Image (cartoon, rainbow, N blue to C red):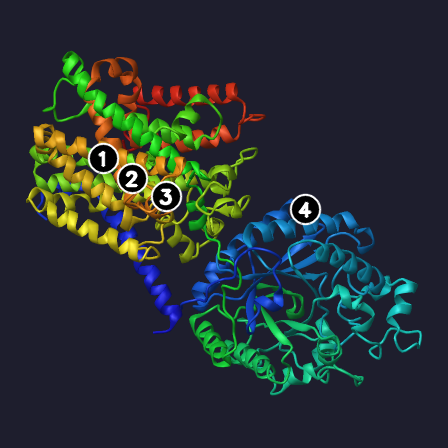
């Protein structure tokens, strides 16, 4: 099976699986009473990129219509990831150009591809300044620093043509090109300047557009290379436009096939396109020899003069058009006939090291302003043929060429970890405090029995709701990134554990507790259908939130990029090396506006591969909720050991193969399903057998066991910390064990052993404290934490919109303590009010 088909089938099956599940869940619950191509490792994105160092074969890629296509769509059609993607931008840069560039760089970097920029002047060449070049270079440097993107810059391409507003102005073009080149070479991006005229047959193209009447006397003298006082086909079509060689890193040549025969080269638009015809044998070779289309013999070729003569690699910009309204040869014969001739010319022209193919459908002046198709992947037949012919070359270098930076990495970068040597110190200190609190709770329980939690036999355990309420407030405060007492507490209160771990395990406990009651109400099948109904609701709400945020991004004066993108703060697991990198968390979302939207964009939506960063864990809950009824079926039949054995098997698989992802969903980069399911499954078992577990752990042997674990674990960390701090070897352990402990046991994403032990410590200590000191804690915080905890999923969903709202407060100083305190207080109060009023409870799951 071809790689494109394997890739498409695999992704499609995954998307259809989740979409089908959603469709089943969306169906009426009326049946409630009825029985039932390995790529190379990319180069690191550090230092100045060197095109020669990056290139290890022929670079081939498309020039896309970025308004209706993108790298993902092209890769999906071709079955390979192209080495380059070309985009046309206006120069000097305006807001639209910066936006389009950033979007293209984001999409290309997700495949580690090179970006070819065709910079088209939108003002007169004489009006271009050094400041314009400096602004362009600054953007180049930022794109390189953020994404590791290598750029080929085709400044004012086809400058020898009469059809461009910057054409046939050699003196101003050379000045502008050298100005841009000087700025680019002085920058740190390592971008390559590409001098790229159009193939010279038909020059000076007076029948193409008529711009020759606008030539100044000075330009006419520069262009009159034979000195006859006229600009004719006898004059050099290339030389007058060539800048200082030091300004040129690569040369380029535009050479399209219009299908009108050799006469069309000179006559241009005056020759109508009447039929689709495959190229004549040897046409590409004749063009490269400067023999095709000329009425005056040429003394040398472009390739010999500028590729070989100037020792520069050549970027060939090409393509073949097809008009479906005309008779003649079929599309494959025309387009394959052209690209095969291009490929056949490569052995005799080894300096052609990169090819861009025009991949668009557009109106074409050469075709009488009719819409024509330039695409080489517009059909499966074409795409398969192109891929096969490229593979037959044996020298094509596919992406990744540079570092691959994906939306998944962007999601992973949202993880906040402490940097420096204080990571284990804080974990150790927190463990010691929790151990002391655990010991004191035993004394309080004996001395003040009236403070105890009143009823361990109730169906609903308010202690769990209390903890969930605290956790969800931590999540809200953490995501609304302003300085306040709330933020200081939320970032430093639970040691190695974040709100996410507790959120998942406590959700499992609650679901395990309530399932028996659901069975009593309507039977096991009805309980399962109701559970799937909840999963359906979660999934549909997840899609709704994703689409709502996307829709809000089009509202004037609302900056949705605050949650649709993520700027690396240098606090993720990659440290400061990625500080400032901007990740697009809505890959290909714009394609959803196409009619019809391409399947790859729809698939990314259905699989939750896009979405706001504060919301990414929602996908994990959808998947776990789908598995919930089946897991409870096993647990009810005393096969909890099967559930846990399978769960630990999946966890072990993740530790061995952390790159293995059952779904490409956004959440998997932050909350890997194979690892994080272990929290949920244990929660289900704990919740279902809660009473038996409480009886066992509150017995004398149980208390001893829990006490030994809590004190022993905390004592172990304190002992290692003391050895590291006071300079003695903590026998029998190695002296450097403490400094290696965080990396080996406490990584945030993969839930290593240390983080799991810390979670057990937090749960045991907090449960013990809440049990013996329930009444005073409930009196102080129960009014807030319990209702929020009982509606924690609702709070999580609505908090996304509060994060967006706060991000758009004009003039907000996020480092202002009083402003941050006011914002956090107002948000918590608003959410509490919404919960008390049950606002949209019928729509949003709780």
Q: Position of residue 421 (x, y in %)?
A: 44, 39
Taking the spot 78% from the left edge, 56% from the top edge, the residue there is 179
Front of the two marks 3 and 1: 1
Give the residue number, with chain letter if any, for mark 1: 712
Taking the spot 15% from the left edge, 48% from the top edge, the residue there is 643
Decide which of tag 1 and tag 2 comes sooner along the chain. 2
Tell me how far mark 4 sits from mark 3, CA to CA: 46 Å
Classify residue 149 as left or right of residue 198: left
Decide which of tag 3 and tag 1 comes sooner along the chain. 1
Classify residue 544 as left or right of residue 442: right
Give the residue number, with chain letter if any, for mark 3: 742
Tell me how far mark 1 sits from mark 2, CA to CA: 41 Å
Q: How many marks?
A: 4
Q: Nearer the viewer, residue 711 or 564?
A: 711
Front of the two marks 1 and 2: 1
Q: In this rendering, is residue 466 above or below 605?
A: above
SS class of the residue under badge 3? helix
> Which disc number belongs to residue 94?
4
Tell me how far mark 1 sits from mark 4, CA to CA: 62 Å
């Amino acid at each position: 099976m071809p790689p494109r088909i394997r890739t498409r089938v695999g992704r499609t099956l995954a998307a259809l699986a989740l979409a089908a599940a959603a469709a089943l869940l969306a169906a009426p619950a009326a049946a409630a009473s009825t029985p039932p191509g390995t790529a190379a490792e990319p180069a690191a994105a550090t230092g100045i990129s060197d095109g020669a160092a990056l290139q290890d074969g022929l670079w081939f890629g498309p020039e896309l219509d970025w308004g209706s296509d993108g790298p993902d769509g092209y890769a999906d059609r071709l079955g390979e990831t192209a080495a380059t993607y070309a985009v046309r931008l206006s120069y000097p840069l305006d807001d639209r150009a910066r936006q389009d560039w950033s979007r293209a760089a984001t999409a290309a970097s997700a495949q580690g591809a090179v970006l070819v920029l065709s910079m088209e002047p939108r003002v007169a060449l004489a009006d271009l300044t050094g400041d314009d070049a400096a602004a362009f270079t600054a953007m180049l440097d930022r794109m390189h620093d953020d994404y590791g993107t290598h750029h080929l810059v085709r400044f004012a391409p086809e400058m020898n043509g009469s059809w461009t507003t910057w054409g046939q102005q050699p003196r101003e073009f050379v000045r502008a090109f050298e100005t841009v080149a000087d700025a680019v070479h002085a920058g740190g991006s390592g971008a390559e300047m590409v001098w790229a005229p159009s193939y010279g047959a038909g020059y000076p193209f007076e029948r193409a557009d008529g711009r020759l009447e606008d030539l100044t006397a000075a330009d006419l003298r520069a262009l009159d290379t034979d000195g006859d006082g006229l600009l004719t086909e006898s004059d050099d079509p290339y030389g007058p436009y060539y800048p200082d060689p030091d300004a040129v890193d690569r040369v380029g040549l535009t050479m399209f096939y219009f299908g009108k025969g050799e006469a069309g080269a000179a006559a241009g638009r005056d020759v109508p396109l009447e039929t689709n015809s495959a190229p004549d044998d040897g046409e590409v070779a004749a063009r490269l020899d400067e023999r095709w289309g000329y009425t005056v013999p040429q003394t040398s070729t472009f390739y010999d003069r500028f590729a070989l003569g100037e020792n520069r690699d050549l970027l060939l910009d090409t393509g073949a058009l097809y008009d479906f309204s005309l008779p003649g040869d079929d599309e494959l014969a025309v387009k394959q006939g052209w690209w095969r001739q291009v490929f056949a010319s490569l052995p005799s022209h080894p300096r052609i090291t990169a090819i861009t193919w025009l991949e668009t459908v557009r109106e074409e002046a050469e075709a009488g302003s009719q819409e024509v198709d330039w695409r080489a992947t517009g059909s499966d037949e074409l795409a398969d043929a192109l891929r096969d012919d490229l593979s037959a070359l044996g020298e094509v270098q596919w992406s990744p060429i540079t570092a691959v930076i994906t939306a998944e990495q962007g999601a992973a970068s949202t993880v906040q970890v402490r940097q420096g040597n204080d990571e284990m110190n804080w974990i150790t200190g927190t463990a010691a405090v929790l151990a002391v609190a655990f010991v004191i709770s035993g004394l309080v329980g004996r001395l003040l029995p009236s403070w105890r939690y009143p009823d361990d036999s109730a169906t609903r355990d308010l202690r769990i709701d209390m903890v969930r309420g605290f956790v969800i407030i931590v999540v809200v405060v953490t995501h609304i990134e302003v300085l306040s007492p709330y933020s200081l507490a939320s970032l430093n209160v639970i040691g190695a554990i974040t709100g996410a771990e507790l959120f998942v395990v406590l959700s499992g406990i609650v679901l395990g507790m309530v399932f028996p009651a659901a069975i009593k109400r309507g039977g096991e099948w009805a309980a399962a259908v109701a559970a799937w109904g909840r999963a359906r609701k979660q999934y549909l709400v997840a899609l709704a939130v994703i689409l709502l945020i996307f829709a809000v991004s089009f509202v004037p004066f609302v900056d949705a990029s605050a949650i649709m993108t993520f700027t690396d703060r240098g606090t993720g697991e990659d440290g400061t090396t990625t500080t400032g990198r901007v990740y697009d968390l809505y890959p290909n979302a714009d394609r959803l506006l196409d009619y019809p939207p391409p399947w790859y964009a729809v698939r990314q939506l259905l699989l939750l591969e896009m979405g706001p960063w504060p919301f990414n864990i929602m996908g994990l809950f959808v998947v776990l909720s789908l598995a919930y009824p089946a897991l409870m079926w096993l647990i009810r039949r005393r096969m909890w050991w099967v559930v846990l054995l399978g769960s630990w098997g999946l966890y072990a698989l993740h530790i061995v193969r952390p790159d293995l992802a059952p779904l490409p969903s956004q959440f998997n980069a932050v909350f890997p399903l194979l690892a994080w399911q272990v929290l949920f499954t244990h929660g289900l078992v704990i919740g279902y057998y809660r009473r038996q577990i409480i009886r066992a752990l509150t017995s004398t042997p149980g208390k001893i066991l829990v006490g030994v674990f809590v004190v022993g674990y905390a004592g172990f960390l304190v002992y290692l910390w003391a050895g590291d701090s006071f300079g003695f070897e903590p026998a029998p352990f190695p002296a450097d064990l403490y400094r290696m402990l965080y990396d080996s046991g406490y990584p945030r994403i993969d839930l290593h052993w240390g983080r799991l032990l810390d979670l057990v410590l937090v749960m045991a200590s907090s449960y013990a404290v809440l049990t013996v000191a329930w009444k005073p804690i409930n009196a102080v915080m129960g009014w807030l934490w319990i209702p929020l905890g009982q509606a924690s999923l609702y709070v999580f969903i609505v908090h996304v919109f509060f994060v967006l709202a706060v991000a758009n407060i004009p003039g907000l100083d996020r480092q202002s303590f009083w402003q941050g305190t006011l914002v956090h207080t107002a948000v918590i109060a608003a959410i509490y009010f919404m919960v008390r009023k049950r606002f949209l409870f019928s729509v949003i799951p709780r």
